[in-house]
Image (cartoon, helix red, strand yellow):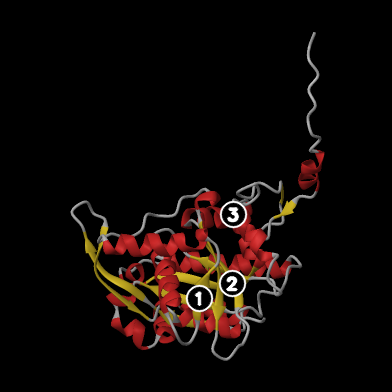
Amino acid sequence: MTPLVTLPLESYQLAKYAEPLVCFVCRFENSFDAETCRGCGAPTALTHQATSPKRAPQMIAVIGPPGCGKTVYLGMLLDLLARRTTGVRALARGAFSVTLQQETVEALASCRFPERTENTPSRWNWVHCQVHLNRRRCPREIIVADPSGDAILGHLEGQGHHPAVSALFARAAAALVLVDVSEVEAGGSDGEYFAVKALSSLDELERKGRRAWRRRPVAVVFTKADVCETCFDDPREYAELHCSSLVQFCHQRFSKVGFFATSVARSDTGPLGSQVPLRVEPRAIVDPFEWLIARTAC
């Protein structure tokens, strides 16, 4: 005879699954205990944290082709903002928000650049931080993603098939568009074409009834500008001379556009053909971010 066993009824735990957890980035419905969104791959910790502040976080889209230095720029930007005591400064929210900063600093300290971001959205670096400004009493909640350049390129070439990139473009309140100066100086134009494609994709969102990108700030950032000092002297003039089609498109489609030149480290070609950082000399890293924050609506 099978003995009877009395077990406590814990059906109340099933109530947690009754209400889905809606992703802050792509609005996909996930179970409450999911670690990453099944729609876009963003950590669900972002969604949990996004519901806690009085003011909803704002997203900044960082857009750049493969190899433009996007990851090292973002990592250095976050490190500088975290170490500041005056002006615009940032405080990370959540352990996952420190990963990009940590990996970038450790890589540069080991005389190498960070590994390229993988295509899988769950492997992207996501950062949620509080941005403090001296003239504001309340900090701003900002979310920044480090999407794969290959994923962005595939999204642009495939006419919007990538759900994570599409959601990032639609939800962002501002954009940083990166252009590799070393490629421009070598006579290449792929970076300019990529930037125009990306900005055209943002502009098309407005035509599909989304929130107007025309009034959102766009910062065009020339990375690796240490190879051309004149780029630092006047980034806008440099853009007009070397990326005229990009400048014309920006002026026709967007009302808030800024041009900036940045550099993280001087580099040289290693024995295996890869780029090796020689000296870490951050220049004008925070300027584009400060410009965006000042022009992003609360």
Nearest to N terminus: mark 3 or mark 1: 3
Q: Nearer the viewer, residue 193 or 295?
A: 295
Outermost residue, top side: 1
Q: In the image, is 199 to the left or to the right of 171?
A: left
Q: Which of the two discs, 1 and 2, sits closer to the camera?
A: 1
Q: Which residue is mark 1?
A: 90
Q: Residue at x 70, y 49 (%)?
A: 32
Secondary element at tag 1: strand
Q: Three-letter amino acid code at disc 2?
A: Ile
Q: Residues within 10 Å of mark 3 (few under 14, many from 20)?
A: many
Determine whether label 3 and label 1 are within 8 Å by CB: no
Q: Residues within 10 Å of mark 2 (few under 14, many from 20)?
A: many
Q: Residue at x 44, y 61 (%)?
A: 100
Cα distance between the residues tagged 3 and 1: 20 Å
On residue 43, the disc is 3
On residue 142, the disc is 2
Nearest to N terminus: mark 1 or mark 2: 1
